[in-house]
Amino acid sequence: MAFAGRRAQFILRRAVVKHLKGPDPDTHGAARLIHVAHREGRDVSSALTPLLITQLKRGGNPWRLINDALRMGVRVHDRAYNKAAQALSTRGDHQGAAKMCEVAARENGKGQLLYNQYNFANLVFAYTGIAEYKALQSLLSRLTSEVRWWHGSRTCKESIKLAMKNVARRIILHSANSEYHRQALIHLDNALLHVKSCRPTWKCRQAVSEAYIGLAGRRLDASLKRLRAMQKRQGKSKGRRGRRQSDEVG
């Protein structure tokens, strides 16, 4: 039953992705497939992710899309929350982006803002964008207070470096209030040192993940081969029954 459920999810996702391919994605057709499957009581969380990503890329309202998905009772993937927060920041709505990160933490991170590298990066960008340095300092203090495998990721490193550039620019442009920005720069620099110290942990985790993905891929290939073999045997069996029935009639 579990294999059948996973296979149904795979088939639905593949059908949705097919609608979304090309320069003019059929988002309405993809949405119809998902809503029909949802009404039938099927798990649509996997199929919903590519649709949400496509809609967000095409300028869809992040809050409407995410809230509609949550009202369906579907688990929204971290990738969708990440893209939604980025879309809000791109529009200049840094407060909205920070709130989106809070929703992601509530739904997927057990209320922990620092539950993955993408939420951290989006929060750093949002807090820096509106010079919300108290919230930024609190976030960075939590980061440096512990060691997690994702702390050493490139995403964390680049988000901090970008924030440092933005804050350094403010120090130059707003010399009268430079100390305020300078303190934020010090906290960012400490966080960057922490991230660099976590790089070995990140690399080890990456190696394990890559090995696991390779193993999972081989298992999936083996499962698909078994499935195709079963379908082939069933086809042959039906063909033999059909020939026997024809012979009996003749």
Image (cartoon, helix red, strand yellow):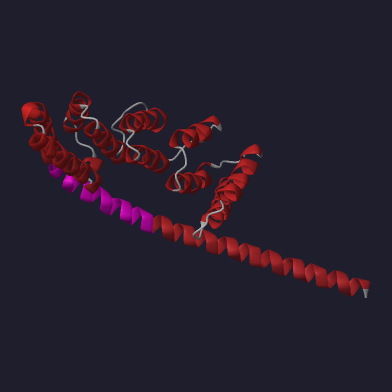
- Going by the image, does 94 lie left or right of 25? left
Q: Looking at the picture, how far across and down is residue 152, in whole percent? A: 20, 44
Q: Looking at the picture, how far across and down is residue 172, in whole percent? A: 8, 37
One can see residue 50 in this view: yes
Residue placed farthest to the right in the image?
250
Most common SS among magenta residues: helix
Q: Quadrant of the N terminus?
A: top right
The residue drawn where x is 17% and y is 48% is 200
The residue drawn where x is 24% and y is 30% is 130
The residue drawn where x is 77% and y is 71% is 240
Q: Looking at the picture, how far across and down is residue 186, in whole percent? A: 8, 33
Q: Looking at the picture, how far across and down is residue 163, in whole percent? A: 18, 39
Which quadrant of the structure image shows residue 145?
top left
The residue drawn where x is 12% and y is 39% is 169
Q: Is residue 52 above or below residue 207?
A: above
Q: Quadrant of the C terminus?
A: bottom right
State yes or no: residue 200 in magenta.
Answer: yes
State yes or no: residue 180 in magenta.
Answer: no
- Going by the image, does 52 lie left or right of 41? left
Q: Is residue 212 above or below residue 79?
A: below
Q: Which residues are magenta?
A: 195-214
One can see residue 194 in this view: no
174, 197: nearer the viewer: 174
